[in-house]
């Protein structure tokens, strides 16, 4: 819904002073002139990716050292994690070459590793917040982003925030985040997380490029793609992923973890299937 602010009819006596600015935005938690809406799955992933890499969903194909001293590649993929060698082998990359900087990851490899990590973080989110399904997708994105940043163990230390989330007290959850040492250390990333947790919705209009002009042909594993493709995520380089069972509505209930498959579509063919176990 687009909210248009306009003047009223002219009155006698010359120009009238403009009306005073209301103390509360007319669109609720959103600034004036912006309408609230739920966060789509592609935006959800883009929100997390932009916090993990300055290149967002494109990631970093070349290895680099993160702020904690870990060799990292793609979209925040830690090469020091115990299963890193096996994960890279599964996407056709040589761990030693990637870690040494002799070989870069492709966009498809970056995408699959990120989708797998999103699935893992979602599993952790359910363990920390059994009522995860009741969160709006924007608040789900915040929790996933914090898990990417701090790990499940780190987020588990926010006991009062997690308790507030489980009882639906989002104002307290945001306040606990705002008043934490993490907020002071993380700066902009934490500020964005706190704001999104407090609002629970997105205020900016949906970017036109978030919906592709044509859906891909029917997948052999997932029958059909809905015309609106709510589970679509566009990655750079023509890589697309689909989660046909995903859907969100303001106020909660996207059940991200209930989807058993995420498919990857690239260069006019389906090239991969990712299973999510929760």
Image: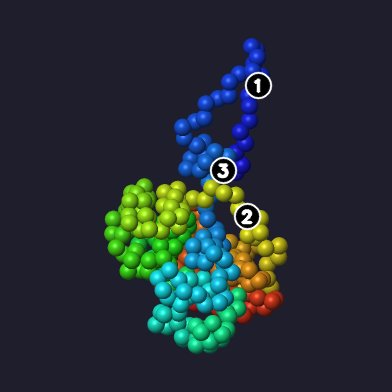
Residue 237 lies left or right of residue 181; in this view the side is: right
Q: Which class describes the residues within 10 Å of circle 1: few (<14), some (14-19), or many (20+)?
A: few
**Image coordinates for residue 220, horizontal then vertical, percent:** 62, 79
Say whether marks 2 and 3 touch (CB < 8 Å): no
Mark 2 = which residue?
Answer: 207
Alpha carbons under labels 2 and 3: distance apart: 14 Å
Whichever of callouts 3 and 1 sits on the residue coming sooner in the sequence is 1
User: Which structural element holds mark 1?
Assistant: loop
Figure label count: 3
Mark 1 = which residue?
Answer: 9
The answer to whether residue 9 is visible is yes
- The quadrant of the image that shows the N terminus is top right
Whichever of callouts 2 and 3 sits on the residue coming sooner in the sequence is 3
Mark 3 = which residue?
Answer: 34
**Image coordinates for residue 90, horizontal then vertical, percent:** 52, 85
- Residue 106, by quadrant, is bottom right
Q: Tell me what residue is drawn at x 61 percent, y 33 percent.
A: 5
Specify how the rendered protein is coloured: rainbow
Q: Tell me what residue is drawn at x 60 percent, y 53 percent.
A: 206
Residue 180 lies left or right of residue 47; in this view the side is: left
Q: Tell me what residue is drawn at x 44 percent, y 63 percent.
A: 145
- Residue 15, by quadrant, is top right
**Image coordinates for residue 24, horizontal then vertical, percent:** 47, 35
Image: 218 above or below 17: below
Q: In front: 200, or 237?
A: 237
- Residue 238, by quadrant, is bottom right
**Image coordinates for residue 44, horizontal then vertical, percent:** 52, 61
Say whether marks 3 and 1 touch (CB < 8 Å): no
């Amino acid at each position: 819904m687009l909210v248009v602010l306009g003047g009223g009819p002219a009155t006698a006596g010359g120009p009238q002073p403009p009306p005073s600015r209301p103390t509360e935005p007319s669109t609720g938690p959103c600034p004036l002139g912006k309408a609230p809406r739920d966060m789509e799955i592609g935006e959800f992933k883009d929100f997390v990716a932009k916090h993990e890499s300055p290149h967002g969903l494109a990631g970093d194909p070349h290895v680099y050292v993160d702020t904690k001293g870990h060799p990292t590649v793609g979209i925040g993929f830690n090469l020091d994690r115990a299963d890193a060698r096996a994960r890279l082998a599964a996407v056709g990359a040589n761990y030693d070459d990637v870690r040494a900087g002799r070989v870069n990851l492709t966009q498809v490899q970056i995408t699959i590793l990120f989708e797998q990590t999103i699935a893992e973080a979602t599993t952790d989110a359910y363990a920390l917040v059994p009522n995860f399904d009741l969160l709006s997708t924007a608040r789900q994105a915040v929790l996933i982003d914090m898990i990417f940043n701090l790990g499940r163990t780190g987020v588990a230390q926010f006991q009062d925030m997690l308790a507030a989330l489980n009882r639906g007290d989002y104002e307290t959850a945001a306040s606990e985040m705002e008043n934490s040492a993490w907020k002071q250390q993380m700066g902009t990333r934490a500020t964005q997380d706190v704001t999104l947790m407090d609002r629970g919705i997105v205020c900016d209009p949906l970017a036109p490029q978030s919906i592709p002009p044509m859906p891909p042909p029917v997948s052999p594993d997932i029958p059909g793609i809905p015309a609106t493709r709510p589970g679509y995520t566009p990655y750079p380089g023509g890589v697309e992923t689909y989660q046909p069972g995903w859907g969100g509505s303001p106020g909660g209930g996207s059940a991200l973890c209930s989807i058993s498959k995420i498919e990857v579509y690239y260069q006019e063919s389906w090239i991969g299937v990712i299973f999510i176990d929760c």
